[in-house]
Image (spheres, rainbow, N blue to C red):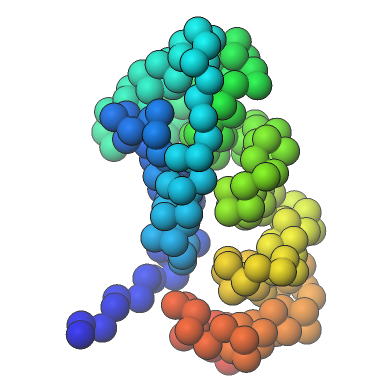
Amino acid sequence: MAKKRKKTRKELLKKPDEFLTISSKLIKLAMEYKTHLTYALGIILVLAVIISGIRFFSIRAENNASALLDKSLTKYNSIKAEKQPDVVYGEVSEDFEFIFKKYDGKESAKLARLFYANICYNAGKYKQAIELYKTALTEFEKFPMIHRQILSNLGYAYEQEEDYSTAVGYFEKISSAPEPIMRDEALYHLGRLYNKLGENEKSREAYNKILTDHQNFIYIDLVRERISG
C-alpha cells in the first residue's frame, strides 16, 4: 500500500477553506461537512447521518428558506474558486444575511449562518465570524460533531485576532471532552498557542500528550519536531 502523504506545515495551519461545502442537489437531505484537519472523512459521514435526520418542516417559510439557501450556495460555489475571499464575501453577504435574518429559527437559516461564518473567516472578517460562530454554537449544541468543529473554528478566529488566551479556552474544551475525536488536533494547537503565550511547560505537556496518547496522529513527526526544536 502506498504511503499516505503527510501534509506540510503550511497545509496544517491554513485557513479552513474547506470547512463546509454543500451539494445543491442534496441540500434537503444531507450536508457534507469537511474539516481542514484530520478526521475529515469521519466528520463527513457523521454529519451526513445527523443532517439526514433533521426534518425540514413542510411549511412555506422553511421551504422558502431552503430554496434560498440552495440558490446562495450554488452562487457561492460557482465563484469561490475564481475570486479572492474578500470579493466572494462582498458578492454573497447579502444573500446569506437575508436568509438567517428573515427566517431566523428555521433549519436552513441555521445552516446559512454557519456557512456564512466560514465565508467571513476566509475573508478576514474575524470579529464578524466569531459572533456568527457563537450563535451557531448554541444552535448546534445537540449535534456534538458540528459543535466540536465550531469550537475549533472559534479557536482559529481568536488566534487570528491575536487573542491567544481566549483561543486556548476553546481548544481546551475539545481536548477535555469525553469523546476523543479531534482531541489530538486540539492538543496540537494548544501546544502552539501556549508557546505563543510564553507558557513553554504547558506547550510541552500538550505535545507530550499527543506522543503518549495519540501515537497515530497524522502530524506526529511535526509534533516531535516542535518538541525537539
> Residue most toward the top?
60
> Relative to residue 44, is residue 209 depicted above or below?
below
- Point out residue 90 in the picture as x, y percentages from the top left corner: 46, 21
Question: x%, y% of residue 141?
Answer: 69, 44
Would residue 163 be seen by someone viewing this image from the given angle? yes
For the point 38% across and 71% down, the residue is 8
152 relative position to 138: left or right: left
Q: Give the answer, above or below, for where 62 lies relative to 146.
A: above
Q: Residue at x 53, y 35 (%)?
A: 54
- x%, y% of residue 139? 68, 35
**As drawn, which residue projects farthest toward the left?**
1
Quadrant of the drawing holding the C terminus: bottom right
Q: Is residue 81 left or right of residue 16?
A: left
> For residue 135, which quarter of the picture?
top right
In this picture, residue 206 sits left or right of residue 61 = right
Residue 199 sits above or below residue 69 on the image: below
Is residue 168 something that shows in the picture? no
Residue at figure coordinates x 62%, y 71% from the top left: 180
In the figure, residue 179 lies in which quadrant?
A: bottom right
Q: Is residue 139 above or below residue 218?
A: above
Which quadrant would the N terminus be assigned to in this image?
Answer: bottom left
Residue at x 38%, y 30% (from the top left corner): 27
- Left or right, residue 217 beside residue 209: left
Residue 126 x %, y %: 62, 39
Q: How many marks?
A: 0
